[in-house]
Image (cartoon, rainbow, N blue to C red):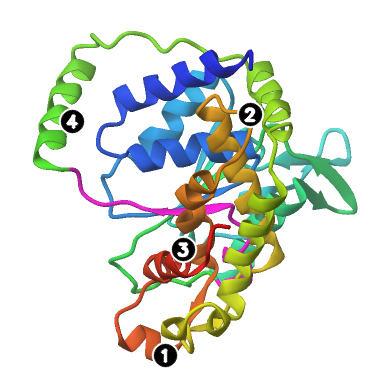
Amino acid sequence: MVNQNAISSLKTALQARIIGQAQLIESLVISLLADGHLLVEGAPGLAKTTAIKTLADGLQCSFKRIQFTPDLMPADVTGSDIYRTEEHRFEFQPGPVFANLVLADEINRAPAKVQSALLEAMSERQVSASGTTYSLPDPFLVMATQNPVEHEGTYPLPEAQLDRFLMKVSLDYPSIEEERSILHLARQQQSKSLPDLVPVAMDDVLAARKEVEAIHVSDAVESYIVRLVDATRRPENYSDALANLISYGASPRATIALDLCARVVAWLENKDFVTPAHVQWVAGRVLAHRLVLSLPAQAKGYTGDSIVEEIISAVAVG
């Protein structure tokens, strides 16, 4: 695994600059290596923008931030044809989605048509304008954010669109000790005394993805992954306590995502095979946002994460 040191160094550098958000950093690295997209839910000021901007600096790749607002148009995201008067022709002007790393800030503030334009680009890795298709760069990662507190003037993402995200992570406030470290870090940044990021070549990232694909998944672990996802659709077959708690379970896309993310975690641990522990480590982030809870489950205070924890407890590993 020749690219292990490069990626580990990048992850360590991110952790040194983004304090108190270890799960966000890990999820960004997993999404990068799994060639997927990340949905982040958290209050303002929790270093979401800083995290993906720092990742872009470490990779020395292009980065764009899109602030989603109610008056945003699809063309503001994907780009549009501009008429060149002197040349008497139209020329496509690429939008901010044409970057390696894209931050879709407060994605739920834009209408469904704009959300769909971005999510189509995420899924197809291309944009179509006036009958012409334009490929997006590789790698291409979108990190979308949602504010969990403020709901006025928002357009919640439909379940079908949520399914397009490889993972979802929810952020919390840092501890008191972490907050002090953040304060010290801010002073270092003001005095420009932080060491420079050691860049990671894009070839290392692409080569790491090839190595992830080669990670072995045994029949037993493969069966475990499938049964975990099946338990979101037919929970009553696995536990009486889970019966009637889930209205709609995860799609086959979730099965593929769970397998891929578990392989990335194994690779990051310098293992050449996946264990059930690797699957369990990412199960919440892969499955929770794909579940539609029943009204009784919501009334009892269940969340997607707590349901996944119940499923992990109910589904036998062997």
Q: Read off the residue under disc 4.
A: 182
Tell me, yes or no, if residue 43 can be seen here: yes
Give the CA distance from mark 1 to mark 3: 22 Å
Residue found farthest to the front: 318
Give the CA distance from mark 4 to mark 1: 40 Å
| Residues packed near mark 1 inside 10 Å, few (<14), some (14 to 19) or many (20 plus) | some
Q: Read off the residue under disc 2.
A: 272
Image x and y of residue 20, in percent: 25, 37
| Mark sitting on residue 295 | 1
Q: Secondary structure at mark 2?
A: loop
Nearer the observer: mark 1 or 2; the answer is 2
Amino acid of disc 2: Asp
Give the CA distance from mark 1 to mark 2: 42 Å
Quarter-of-image position of residue 59: top right
Report how many numbered discs are placed on residues in the image.
4
| Mark sitting on residue 312 | 3
Determine whether 66 is above or below 19 in the image.
below
Quarter the N terminus occupies = top right
Give the CA distance from mark 4 to mark 3: 34 Å
Q: Residue at x 68, y 58 (%)?
A: 223
First reached walking from the N terminus: tag 4 or tag 1: 4
| Residues packed near mark 3 inside 10 Å, few (<14), some (14 to 19) or many (20 plus) | some
Q: Secondary structure at mark 1?
A: helix
Q: Nearer the viewer, residue 27 or 224?
A: 224
Asked if the stretch drawn in magenta spans residue 164, the answer is yes
The range drawn in magenta is 158-174
Q: Residue at x 32, y 54 (%)?
A: 42
Amino acid of disc 3: Ile
Image x and y of residue 155, in percent: 48, 72
Q: Nearer the viewer, residue 63 or 95?
A: 63
Image x and y of residue 163, in percent: 61, 64
Amino acid of disc 1: Leu
